[in-house]
Image (cartoon, rainbow, N blue to C red):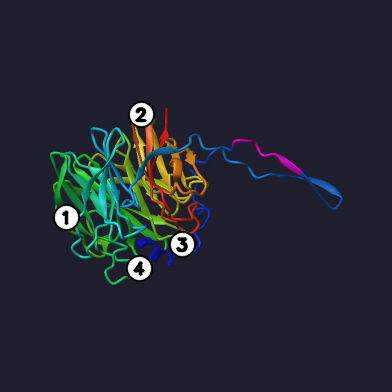
Amino acid sequence: MKTFRRFRGLMVVIAAVALALPAFATQQSADKSSTEVQKKGGRKRAVPRKKRLAPPLKQAELLAELPDWCNTPDGMALLPGGDIILSVPNFNDKKAPPLLMKITRDNRLEEFYRLPKNPDTGRMGPMGIVAGPTGDLYLADNQLFHDPDGKPMLFGKSRLVRIVVKDGKPAGVVPVVTGFNVSNAVAIRGDYVYVSETILEPNSQPLVSGVFRFKLAEEGIQLRQPLKNDPHLIATILTYNKDIPFGADGMTFDEAGNLYVGNFADGTLHRIEFDESGKVKSNRIFARAPFMKSCDGIWFDPRTRKIYVADSLANAVQMVSLDGTVQTLAQDRDNDGSGGRLDQPCEVLVRNGEVVVANMDFPVPGGVNKTFDKPYTLSRIRLD
């Protein structure tokens, strides 16, 4: 995210492994550890070699190469007919406008909507996006990096908006909620829309982030400040990584109605369960693994009964079973994304038996990806 470049100066080198929390899942090594013999004081002793992780199960391929004015792909919404709406904030190079693109079910690229200006900053920051039950789109307008005075971070100006869609065409923007610090992922279940707030309490340690819930019929909401006092806040998440101030990120629901939330900097997947009245009854870490470095966009696929995780820092897509086991589905070393190789994935969804991956390609210190460069791509990973 050039807006994110300002933010890079606030980060130090990223911790290689998330803070040690109780392990719910680990990946089995491909080979049992072997030993080597060393001499010490005239005697031989066996020293175990480091275990090697199992190789990725699949290889990412090219789904689509984006045009030059789509330098930072981010969120994706799957429409009922199989089309995908892609949010493109163009954080890497702000000469290009923020917009929404359509990837048709036969993988043709079409411009869907050049977004109007944000009334406070003059530029929208489209990130998480989801299709509502009436066909309208709910979109997170992240303003964190759009301070008109050039400050590194702008709090309290991010929004949730509704893109009115008529006859398959965008017909305007309706503000739904204003006052987020970092509105990020958006999910809908039943009569409610959920939004992850990635920095609920700026400068808190551990960092406090959270999840908000609103009725789909609500509009024109101004959140209370500080955000922790707003009644729409239903859950909080703590992030212990001191080097990256980003917490709650991607969200997805399973068939039973449990909400899963990715904790970006700690690389942990959280599960929030509800009682019959809709109140939160539990909020805990559901899955983690030493090789899952971050937890960005996530997607539950009912057919495979897996949760797919865009692991931005590891340049990988992880696969989490409902028992909490984590496996690496696909992973690439640092590269330019050509041929569909993973290039800092930030979002995933499953369509027609394959995982579609948006490659944000925004270098973060400590991550595998080192350079923002062409081509700008979407990848796919075939599951069958």
* Residue lying farthest to the right in this orientation: 42
Q: Nearer the viewer, residue 189 or 340?
A: 340
Disc number placed over residue 152 in the picture, else none? 4
| Residue nearest the observer in this picture, 152 or 199 | 152
> Does dot 2 land on a helix, a strand or a loop?
loop
Q: Earlier in the sequence, mark 4 or mark 3?
A: 4
Q: Which residue is mark 2?
A: 303
Q: Earlier in the sequence, mark 3 or mark 2?
A: 3
Image x and y of residue 104, in percent: 27, 36
Residue appearing at x 46%, y 56% in the figure: 371
Which of disc 1 and disc 3 is earlier in sequence?
A: 1
Chain part drawn in magenta: 30-36
Q: CA distance from mark 4 to mark 3?
A: 18 Å
The majority secondary structure of the magenta stretch comes to: loop
Is label 3 in a helix, a strand or a loop? loop
Distance between mark 1 and mark 4 Cα atoms: 25 Å
Name the secondary structure under disc 4: loop
Instruction: Identify which amino acid the numbered label 4 is placed on.
Output: Pro
Cβ atoms under marks 1 and 2 closer than 8 Å: no
Counting residues from the N terminus, which is met first, the one under dot 1 or under dot 2? 1
